[in-house]
Amino acid sequence: MHATDFIVARNDLQQCKSIETQLPDAAALPADALLVKITRFAFTANNVTYAVMGDALKYWQLFPAPKDFGNIPVWGFGEVIASKHPNVAVGETLFGYFPMATHLVIEAADVTKRGLRDGAAHRQVAAPVYNAYARVSGDPAFTGKQGDYQALLRPLFMLSFLVDDFLAENDFYGARRVMLSSASSKTAYGLAHLLHGRDGIKVIGLTSAPNVAFVKSLGCYDEVVTYDAVTSIPADAPAAYVDMAGNSDLRERLHRHFGDQMKYSGRVGLTHRSTSPDEPELPGAKPSWFFAPDHIRKRAKEWGPGGVDTRFGAAWSGFVPKLDQWLTVTEGRGPAAVQQVYLDTLNGRVPPDQGHILSI
C-alpha cells in the first residue's frame, strides 16, 4: 500500500505536488511505534508562515521530504491504525502536529492518559509543543465542528493568548492603544478578542479595504483603519504594535509616524510575506520577534503543573462561542482539493470568514 504526501519547493512555494511513498508495514514497526492515518487537518495563513520560516525555525526537519522540497506542518487529527506500544490502542484519536500527508509513523514516548510525544530524533530540533499529541478519543470538544475549531484555531489562539499575557505582564509598555496588522487574520482577531476584554485598552485593527466590513463585524476592534490611512491615527500618545502581516513598508510608516511614542513593536506573523532583509533603523521601540515557546516555558515554570492549560482553557471557553458567527468551515478531500486551498491561501485568495479542513 502507498501513502500520499503533499510537498512544496522550499525555494519557490508556488511549486507544489503530491507524491506517493511506501506505507510502512504495520508488522515491521519498531517497538513503541504507531502508524497513524491522518484523518483531517486545518490549513490557514499560519501554515504559510511555517513554510516561509521553514529553514530558520527548522520546521522543514520535522517531516522529511525529498531533496529541495518540504512538507508543511499542519494541526489536525489522526487515527492509530497500528500500534507497537502496549499502552496505545488501535483506533485511538490523536490531535497534534502532522505533515500534509495520509500517514505518519510516531515513535511514542512519555505516554500518559492525556497524551504522548514523538520521540523521533529528527523531531527534537523544534520546541516540545510541536512534538506533543493529545489523546482525544471520545472527547466532545474534539469532535465534529468543535474539533474543526480546535484544528483551525486552537494553535493560533494559543499564540493570541500568549501575546495578550505577555503584553499585560509588561503593562503594555505604557501604551493604552494596541494596533494589530492583518486584523482579519485568525490570530489577530483572537488577540483582539482578549484585549477587548481588558479595561482601558483600545484595540485598533489595521487591514486592507476589502476586509474592512468583516473586521468591523467582529465587534472586538474599537477602531478599524485601512493600511493607506495609518498615519491618520493620532501619534500624541504611547502605542503598541503587534505585527501579524510582516510588511516592512507598513512597519516603517508606523514607526516614523509614531516616533518615540511607539513603545512596543512585536513581530508575530508573516501573512503579507513582504519583509525586507535590509530594514533601516527605525524610531521608537526596536521591532522584535515574539517567540511563543519561550513565553510558554516561562509561564509553565511560574504557574506550575496545569497552570497554562487551566488559564488557556478558560480563555478558549470564552472565545469559541463567537466562532459560529465569525467563521464558515469548508471541507476538502483529495490531493487536488489540498493543492487548491494551499495555492489560494498562499496567494491571499481565501476570504477571512472561511476556514478550511482538509484530508488527502
Image: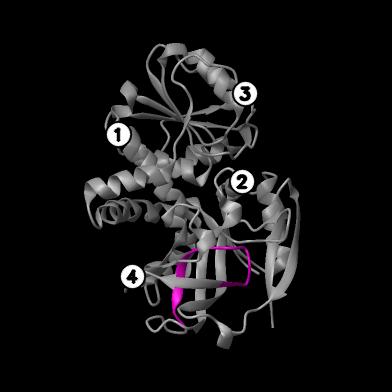
Amino acid type at image mark 3: Asp
The x, y position of residue 89, in whole percent, is 42, 84
How many angstroms separate mark 1 from mark 2 (CA)? 31 Å
**Which of marks 2 and 1 precedes in the sequence?**
2
Q: State left or right for residue 329 relative to residue 277.
A: left
Q: Distance between the residues labelled 3 and 4?
A: 45 Å
Seen from this angle, which residue lies furthest bottom?
27
Give the magenta range: 91-104
Residue hosting label 2? 55
Nearer-N-terminus badge (1/3): 1
Report the mark closest to the observer, 2 or 4. 2
Residue occupied by mark 1? 168
Other-residue count near label 1 (Cα within 10 Å), few / some / many at <14 / 14–19 / ≥20: few
The residue under label 4 is which amino acid type?
Arg
- Which image quarter is the C terminus in? bottom right
SS at badge 3:
helix
Q: Which image quarter: residue 65?
A: bottom right
The mark that comes first in sequence, 3 or 4, is 4
Q: What residue type is labelled 2?
A: Asp
Q: Which of marks 1 and 4 is in front?
A: 4
User: Does the segment drawn in magenta span residue 93?
Assistant: yes
Pair 3/4: label in front: 4
Give the mark nearest the N terminus, 1 or 4.
Answer: 4
**The residue under label 1 is which amino acid type?**
Ala
Tell us which disc is closer to us: 2 or 3: 2
Q: Name the residue under label 3.
A: 249
Q: Is residue 43 magenta?
A: no
Tell me the number on the disc at residue 114.
4
Task: Quote the CA–CA distance across marks 2 and 3.
Answer: 24 Å
The x, y position of residue 104, in whole percent, is 57, 71
Contact (Cβ within 8 Å) of mark 1 with mark 4? no
